[in-house]
Image (cartoon, rainbow, N blue to C red):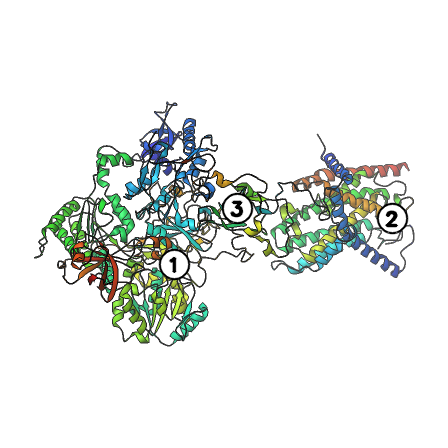
């Protein structure tokens, strides 16, 4: 530690950091624009000027930029020095010279870093009387709104979009005071992380376009800490609501997981909650076979009467539902009748992942992905299935540059200098995939192959690392060469990482990855495994355990006598429409608990509207086995309630223990902990409902929330008490503790004078460090300590067939995930249905450019436009997964392709 | 030094003299008071000199309101002009403090010298935008926010606001 | 006990009852009317109108208020000591009414002529403090209790020199009988020889009646409403009536003891008495209109450090003068 003297007061600081970083960590107010904790310093905006003194006797001092000056031991600076203050005020005045008179109609207003900094420097009066320069805006797609007049040229946007997220379609144009940040021409921002521009931009140039459609100021938003429900990474989000409408999702910092950034699916996928077509009312199928609305009480009573005899219950769980909901189902239907709501393939993948994590490979968090210095991505297209992991992997590549900079004596926060010194130097990132991926540009080398071949590649590398004979297996020379380079890179790394996942539906890949990590660990390297998972609670469901839907499909004679309870699951997306129809047709009675309207609704006898992630509190387990609590944001309208409450109500009606005793979430959690030891400690993953700060619950609304006595005055002149929340330590109003709650329960980042998201630094132990209070969640999976048992089964090589193509699933960040696909903004980015074919394979099938392909995959026949993907291996095609406009296909599968007749 | 009793007697005398002073009370309703133009009475929403709604739905009045009796929802027309989709004041909660008027950056919300708005039913004191909007500029003639703001709206493109240069030509690299 | 008064004796029972009933009704009516008088006078001195809408000159305002108060929910707080809570407001009305019993309004008009009338008056007016204490105690409310404690201390203190102040009058008149005291003032009202006695008695009287500026037991700025915080409706009304009767009693006593009671030229005796009482009441209201409430410790300090010495000195001097005059005579 070094000693820094700020205005004569001594502070203990980190000498490897810069002055601005340390001043903010100390909680001192120093204005800044271009610096960002994740992007480093470039000294572009000249706003963080401070006076630097030579020694104790120096009273003259010089003005330096705090972000560009290291916090060396004994440094003496002054923030309040008259000259430094005047300098900062003048800089703001220059920036404001052209800033438009827009604040009242600007979406950033009230949470604008520029506003905060202007107030902080004390600039109030505009002296510049000449015309303001203006710019034309660009249409940047459904996510980000562009208002270029407001720009203050801090360069944060390009530094994030191009340097950090690897975007290529955005840049800075023009010269002098004509500097323009945008695309070469109007068009959708292609990068998967474009939404972060909204938070990165210190003013209102880039704003959230979905928020604009139902605009609410930050001070009116009722927010709660949440966990993104759109993939298995479990990124932390702040979800905000006003007047019954979910308004926006923002990144919620967590040092271990998503840091400062979020992917666009996580940020913009929320609007399915507001969708008018979602399930909101309890309904019941009448004798004529039509679904009619019915009051919840009456419906439950009738349901329980029908179940009342000894009708066995069969429960179909869901990786999309919370642990509590799944456990409530398991308790209601008894473990032997509890089926994990996924297909045999998904089940195999999930089991393998769990076995791998428990046996060999410690799972890596996103922060650990980012700190790895050699990565092999095996099969998983993480940009599409686990986008935030791709962004982390992209940063991991910079470790070589950091090492070089360090050797040259350049601190890592000197962003521009580090990037210049790197001169294209990258840490090893090897990508093995079926098709080209969006991360290829960051990769050292890419390799394409069919899933089984990639598994073989994994084994080949593992064998090379452990210098074992392949047991009679021989690998082609191309694979050998690649595996040699990968093996060398991984073995030479300090923190090697293997990334894979279940998206290709190939358990062998997971075996191979496990084998590889095992080999690395045998070498004494702290190798880790990062897993991409398609759904938010895949790991949680795997931990809970049960049989897959395949077993249920077999039990055909059992079904007719049973009542089927389907929990937040669209069975057609699991086992295909035909199989799902068969299950529904056989079941004696079907109860569906869901929020999304899908094919299952038309087959259910009772439909109970479930709460979405924003309308209930609950727990999910992410890809690294971290149990995390997400908190309810608002009280849902109509009949909607949390799934576990519906199941509890059914349990009560049937007099089943212990469901009938559950009143609050913590009751379920405690029963869960008692029943399944693997979840021990789960209730402590976040503050429990009884948590109080200074005797108060935590307020979801900021203290300035407005309109309380008018917002519903047209409906009822009397103001009703806000709903009570027995599931969490938060309240549905501005009444409650507003200061500094523990990390997992911070509803919104705000500090006096810091209205923008930059207020975050006031909640961190140090800038960029962990949040004050407890850490995020609870790790449930600890790998075995002893030397692991290797996964050894090498699959045979992939052999292309003449009569058919092997279709693998192509996941899309927008469209493949079921919930976010219901969001209008995301819907605009969902690709049109297609089939991707290698041009040679297409030519063999007689397809010319522009032709429509006729496909037969499994029992499904399709006509799709085809597109050429030359990087696909021979004999392999790819089909997009789960697009709303396409029927569900059970992939991977062999299928026939031909030219469609007109 | 004054004896306390003397000061007490002094004040009693002073009060007693008020017996012959005229009364300040105005005998409302027979006699109407003269209210100055800045009287803080019934709140209205004014229009700009072009006859358009002045309110740009910035929420500043709502956040300034001590009894939280203003509620609105911002929306935009097809050209990006922002206005309130609804604007509601619950006068049964309003304390006529005038903070909303002070907070308003566009002179849209104004308090008027009218206080005769009693109702027998509280529900009738909830005023919507239709009841609040008047057809003139109210106390502040002349100001039109969108003529000053940089935001483009229908009929006013980029660079056409007051004191604005035409939009920059990015292809022009001359110094 | 005997009658020493001048004029017609109150002989028959019927006449006595009629007399008493008439005074009771008149007193209660006057007390109610005083509400209107006070509000109008305060308004006058504050350059306002006061109640002027209900009936002529707003006279029916009192009726309206009474109707309102009658129809209010007769509520006893669940945490209160109910019997005592109900009893307390009655005590104040009864004690002040009792005190008025000995006031000689005019020759032949008066409820009762006691030869120890003055002592009876002092005794009855001291009983009023029970009402305050019982109300405060029974309310089971911290503000009420604090008000009651203040009331007890205040009345106990001012009781002392209230009595002492009157002893000068007794010495001069040589009797406790109020009629005799009035008649003794035929030549000179005692306000002249007993000026200091008058001042002390007026101050003590205000304190006894808990009127502004000595309304510390209520002190709405600090104690919500002091001892009657929990009271509402008719019971609150009783406290109100008790307070106004108290004003009338004190004014009547001032008139009787220091301003020659019914004595005066020209007008009938009862008119003189009423005029003097009215001036006294107006003076009380003027005090309310003009003086701020002292701090509690100031109130006690005035009492013990100023009023008591003045009363004692007055008594000593009066005694000396009476002895000297007797010796000389």
Residue under pointer 2: C271
What distance separates the C-alpha of mark 2 from that of mark 1?
86 Å
Task: Tell me if residue B10 comes above or below residue A724 in the rendering.
Answer: above
The mark lying in front, picked from 2 and 1, is 1
Q: Nearer the viewer, residue A866 or A140?
A: A866
What distance separates the C-alpha of mark 3 from that of mark 1?
38 Å
Is B146 left, or right, of A169 in this rendering?
Answer: right
| Disc number placed over residue A612 in the picture, else none | 1
Rendering coords of residue A492 (x, y %): 16, 44
Residue visible at 61% across and 60% down in the picture: C78
**For the residue labelled by badge 2, is the local secondary structure a helix, a strand or a loop?**
helix
Rendering coords of residue C49 (x, y %): 74, 45
Question: What is the quadrant of residue A897 in the picture?
Answer: bottom left
**For the residue labelled by badge 3, is the local secondary structure a helix, a strand or a loop?**
loop
- Give the position of the N terminus of chain A as an image quadrant: top left
Q: Nearer the viewer, residue C265 or B63?
A: B63
Rendering coords of residue B56 (x, y %): 49, 45
- Give the position of the C terminus of chain A as an image quadrant: bottom left
Residue visible at 40% across and 58% down in the picture: A275
Is A589 left, or right, of C156 in this rendering?
Answer: left
Mark 3 on the same chain as mark 1: no
Around disc 1, counting alpha carbons within 10 Å, would you say few (fewer than 14), some (14 to 19), or many (20 or more)? many
The mark lying in front, picked from 2 and 3, is 3
Residue under pointer 3: B53
């Amino acid at each position: 530690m070094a000693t820094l003297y700020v205005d004569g007061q001594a502070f203990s600081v980190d000498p490897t950091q810069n002055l601005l970083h340390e001043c903010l960590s100390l909680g001192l107010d120093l204005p800044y624009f271009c610096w960002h904790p994740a992007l480093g310093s470039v000294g572009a905006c000249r706003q963080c000027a401070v006076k630097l003194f030579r020694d104790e006797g120096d009273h003259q001092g010089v003005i330096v930029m705090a972000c560009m000056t290291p916090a060396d031991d004994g440094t003496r600076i002054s923030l309040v020095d008259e000259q430094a203050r005047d300098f900062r005020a003048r800089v703001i005045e220059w920036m404001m010279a052209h800033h438009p008179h827009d604040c009242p109609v600007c979406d950033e207003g009230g949470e604008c870093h520029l506003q905060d900094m202007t107030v902080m420097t004390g600039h109030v009066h505009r002296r510049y009387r000449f015309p303001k320069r203006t710019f034309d805006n660009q249409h940047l797609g459904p996510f980000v709104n562009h208002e270029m007049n407001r720009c203050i040229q801090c360069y944060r946007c390009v530094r994030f979009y191009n340097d950090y997220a690897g975007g290529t379609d955005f840049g800075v144009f023009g010269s002098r005071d004509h500097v323009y940040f945008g695309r070469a021409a109007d068009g959708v921002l292609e990068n998967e992380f474009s939404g972060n521009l909204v938070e990165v931009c210190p003013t209102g140039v880039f704003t959230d376009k979905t928020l604009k459609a139902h605009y609410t100021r930050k001070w009116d938003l009722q927010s709660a800490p949440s966990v993104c429900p759109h993939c298995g990474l479990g990124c932390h989000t702040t979800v905000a609501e006003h007047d019954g409408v979910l308004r926006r999702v923002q990144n919620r910092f967590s040092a271990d997981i998503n840091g400062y950034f979020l992917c666009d699916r996580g940020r913009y996928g929320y609007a399915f909650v507001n969708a008018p077509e979602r399930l909101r009312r309890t309904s019941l199928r009448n004798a004529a076979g039509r679904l009619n609305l019915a009051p919840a009480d009456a419906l439950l009573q009738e349901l329980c009467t029908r179940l009342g005899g000894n009708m066995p219950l069969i429960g179909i769980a869901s990786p999309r539902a919370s642990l509590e909901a799944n456990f409530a189902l398991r308790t209601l239907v008894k473990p032997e009748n509890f089926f994990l709501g996924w297909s045999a393939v998904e089940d195999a993948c999930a089991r393998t992942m769990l076995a791998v994590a428990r046996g060999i490979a410690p799972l890596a968090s996103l922060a650990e992905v980012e700190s790895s210095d050699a990565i092999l991505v095996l099969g998983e297209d993480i940009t599409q299935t686990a986008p935030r992991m791709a962004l982390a992997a992209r940063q991991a590549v910079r470790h070589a540059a950091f090492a070089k900079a360090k050797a040259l004596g350049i601190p890592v926060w000197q962003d521009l200098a580090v990037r210049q010194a790197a001169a294209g130097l990258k840490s090893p990132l090897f990508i093995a995939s079926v098709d080209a991926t969006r991360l290829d540009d960051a990769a050292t080398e890419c390799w394409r192959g069919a899933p089984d071949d990639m598994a073989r590649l994994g084994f080949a590398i593992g064998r090379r690392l452990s210098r074992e004979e392949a047991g009679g297996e021989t690998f082609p020379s191309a694979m050998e060469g690649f595996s040699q380079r990968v093996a060398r890179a991984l073995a030479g790394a300090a923190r090697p990482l293997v990334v894979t996942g279940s998206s290709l539906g190939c358990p062998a890949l997971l075996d191979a990855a496990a084998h590889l990590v095992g080999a690395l660990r045998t070498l004494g390297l702290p190798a880790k495994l990062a897993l991409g998972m398609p759904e938010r609670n895949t790991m949680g469901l795997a931990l809970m355990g049960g049989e897959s839907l395949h077993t249920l499909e077999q039990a055909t004679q059992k079904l007719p006598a049973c009542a089927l309870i389907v929990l937040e699951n669209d069975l057609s997306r699991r086992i295909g429409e035909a199989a799902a129809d068969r299950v529904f047709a056989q079941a004696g009675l079907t109860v569906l608990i869901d929020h999304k309207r899908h094919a299952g609704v038309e087959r259910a006898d009772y439909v109970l509207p479930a709460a979405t992630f924003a309308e209930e509190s609950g727990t999910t387990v992410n890809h690294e086995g971290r149990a995390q609590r997400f908190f309810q944001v608002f009280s849902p309208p109509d009949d909607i309630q949390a799934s576990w409450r519906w199941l509890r109500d059914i349990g009560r009606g049937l007099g089943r223990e212990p469901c009938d005793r559950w009143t609050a979430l913590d009751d379920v959690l405690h029963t869960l902990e008692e029943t399944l030891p693997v979840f021990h400690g789960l209730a402590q993953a976040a503050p429990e409902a009884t948590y109080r700060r200074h005797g108060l619950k935590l307020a979801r609304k900021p203290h300035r929330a407005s309109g309380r006595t008018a917002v519903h005055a047209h409906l009822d002149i009397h103001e009703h008490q806000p709903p009570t929340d027995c599931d969490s330590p938060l309240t549905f109003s501005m009444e409650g503790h507003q200061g500094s709650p523990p990390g997992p329960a911070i509803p919104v980042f705000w500090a006096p004078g810091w209205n923008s998201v930059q207020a975050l630094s006031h909640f961190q132990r140090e800038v960029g460090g962990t949040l004050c209070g407890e850490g995020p969640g609870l790790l449930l999976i600890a790998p075995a300590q002893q030397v692991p048992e290797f996964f050894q089964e090498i699959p045979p090589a992939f052999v292309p067939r003449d009569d058919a193509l092997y279709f693998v699933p192509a996941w899309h960040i927008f469209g493949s995930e079921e919930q976010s696909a219901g969001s209008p903004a995301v819907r605009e980015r969902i690709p049109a249905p297609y089939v991707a074919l290698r041009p040679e394979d297409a030519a063999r099938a007689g397809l010319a450019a522009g032709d429509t392909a006729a496909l037969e995959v499994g029992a499904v026949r399709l006509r799709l436009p085809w597109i050429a993907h030359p990087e696909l291996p021979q004999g392999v095609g790819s089909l997009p997964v789960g697009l709303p406009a396409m029927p569900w296909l059970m992939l991977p599968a062999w299928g026939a392709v031909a030219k469609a007749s007109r | 030094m004054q004896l306390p009793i003397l000061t007490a007697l002094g004040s009693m005398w002073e009060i007693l003299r008020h017996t012959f002073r005229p009364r300040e009370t105005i005998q409302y309703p027979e006699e109407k008071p003269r209210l100055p133009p800045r009287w803080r009475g019934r709140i209205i929403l004014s229009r700009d000199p072009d006859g358009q709604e002045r309110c740009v739905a910035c929420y500043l009045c709502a956040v300034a309101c001590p009894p939280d009796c203003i509620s609105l929802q911002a929306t935009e027309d097809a050209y990006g002009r922002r206005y309130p989709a609804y604007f509601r004041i619950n006068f049964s909660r309003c304390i006529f403090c005038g903070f909303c008027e002070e907070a308003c950056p566009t002179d849209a919300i104004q308090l008027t010298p009218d206080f005769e708005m009693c109702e027998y039913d509280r529900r009738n004191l909830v005023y919507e935008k239709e009841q609040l909007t008047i057809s003139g500029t109210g106390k502040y003639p002349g100001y039109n926010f969108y003529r000053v703001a940089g935001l483009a709206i229908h009929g006013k493109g980029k660079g056409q606001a007051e004191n604005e240069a035409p939009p920059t030509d990015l292809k022009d690299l001359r110094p | 006990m005997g009658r020493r008064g001048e004029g017609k004796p109150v002989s028959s029972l019927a006449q006595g009852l009629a007399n008493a009933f008439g005074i009771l009704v008149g007193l209660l009516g006057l007390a109610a009317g005083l509400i209107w008088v006070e509000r109008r006078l305060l308004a006058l001195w504050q350059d306002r109108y006061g109640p002027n809408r209900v009936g002529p000159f707003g006279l029916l305002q009192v009726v309206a208020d009474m109707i309102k108060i009658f129809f209010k929910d007769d509520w006893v707080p669940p945490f209160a000591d109910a019997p005592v809570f109900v009893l307390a407001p009655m005590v104040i009305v009864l004690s002040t009414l009792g005190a008025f019993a000995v006031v000689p309004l005019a020759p032949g008009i008066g409820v009762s002529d006691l030869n120890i009338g003055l002592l009876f008056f002092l005794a009855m007016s001291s009983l009023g403090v029970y009402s305050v204490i019982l109300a405060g105690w029974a309310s089971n409310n911290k503000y009420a209790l604090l008000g009651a404690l203040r009331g007890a201390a205040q009345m106990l203190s001012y009781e002392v020199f209230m009595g002492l102040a009157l002893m000068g009058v007794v010495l001069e008149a040589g009797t406790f009988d109020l009629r005799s005291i009035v008649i003794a003032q035929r030549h000179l009202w005692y306000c002249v020889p007993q000026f200091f006695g008058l001042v002390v008695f007026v101050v003590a009287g205000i304190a006894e009646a808990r009127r502004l500026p000595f309304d510390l037991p209520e002190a709405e700025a600090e104690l919500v409403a002091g001892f009657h915080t929990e009271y509402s409706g008719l019971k609150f009304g009783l406290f109100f009536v008790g307070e106004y009767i108290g004003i009338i009693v004190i004014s009547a006593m001032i008139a009787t003891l220091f301003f020659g009671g019914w004595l005066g030229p020209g007008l009938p005796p009862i008119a003189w008495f009423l005029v003097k009482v009215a001036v006294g009441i107006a003076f009380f209201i003027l005090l309310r209109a003009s003086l701020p409430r002292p701090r509690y410790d100031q109130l006690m300090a005035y009492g013990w450090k100023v009023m008591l010495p003045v009363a004692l000195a007055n008594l000593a001097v009066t005694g000396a003068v009476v002895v000297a005059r007797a010796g000389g005579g």
